[in-house]
Image (cartoon, rainbow, N blue to C red):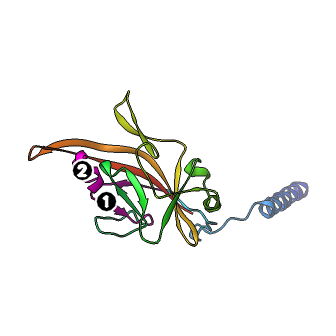
Amino acid sequence: MNSNIKTILKSAMAVTVLSAAVWAAAPTTESATAPLALNQAKANSNYTVVGQWWSPAAAATWPAVYVDLATGAQSLSSSGQVAFFSHVNGSIKANGSYSIRTVAKDIASVTASDWATATSVSSQGSGEWYEYDLDSHANQAIQPLTVLVGNSSGASYAVKLINFTNVGQQVVAGQLQVKADTNIEVKAL
């Protein structure tokens, strides 16, 4: 019986030593309530710029939709960093103290340092940022093209045209009017 007690004690001691070794080698984990550290993680945002009904015959006077790229807020009064104007509010231009430049890269690979080598433009529209596809009869984004939006401090945002939705036409007082919503992806730089 003495021998059985010794065997049991030896087994218990071995289990204790093994448990301590496994516990010591296990990776440490943080508390489930501890905040996660995000090192410069920036999520892209998708916005729908709500287009305005207007006559294609008067595209030069199409009401601009101004967009704050940080929040997606839209206004018909001058605000934000960019304005969407012209035919179906599909063209983009800088607003206020901002300027725009283009780079032939996908938005995923664009960084703030691309500002230095990007092409300065006053606006981007039909034949530059999008083109009309004869087969689908739809305006389609020119890929890969990203518009950089910045000021004297450098690039602040990258904007990619995704597509146009909610395309429509109506006749008001005998005059054709059209509209579309412009869907964009925005990346803070």
Query: Relative to 129, does residue 40 appear above or below in the rendering?
Result: below
Query: Relative to 115, does residue 162 appear above or below in the rendering?
Result: above
Task: Answer left or right for 159 relative to 1.
Answer: left
Residue 136 picture location, percent across and down = 36, 30
Q: Is residue 12 magenta?
A: no
Q: Nearer the viewer, residue 13 or 117?
A: 117
Q: Which residue is mark 1?
A: 64
- Disc 2 residue crowd, few under 14, some 14–19, many 20+, Cα 10 Å: few
Q: The disc labelled 1 sits on which kind of residue?
A: Ala
Q: The disc labelled 2 sits on which kind of residue?
A: Ala
Q: Nearer the viewer, residue 111 or 29?
A: 111
* Residue at 43% from the left image edge and 66% from the top image edge: 81
Image quarter hosting the C terminus: bottom right
Image quarter hosting the N terminus: bottom right
* Residue at 39% from the left image edge and 49% from the top image edge: 183
* Residue at 48% from the left image edge and 68% from the top image edge: 98
For label 2, the SS is helix
Magenta-drawn segment: 45-70
- Disc 1 residue crowd, few under 14, some 14–19, many 20+, Cα 10 Å: many
**Disc assigned to residue 58:** 2
Q: CA distance from mark 2 to mark 1?
A: 13 Å
Residue 99 picture location, percent across and down = 49, 64
Q: Nearer the viewer, residue 149 or 108?
A: 149
Residue 64 picture location, percent across and down = 31, 59
For label 1, the SS is loop
Contact check, label 2 and label 1, Cβ < 8 Å: no
Q: Is residue 60 magenta?
A: yes
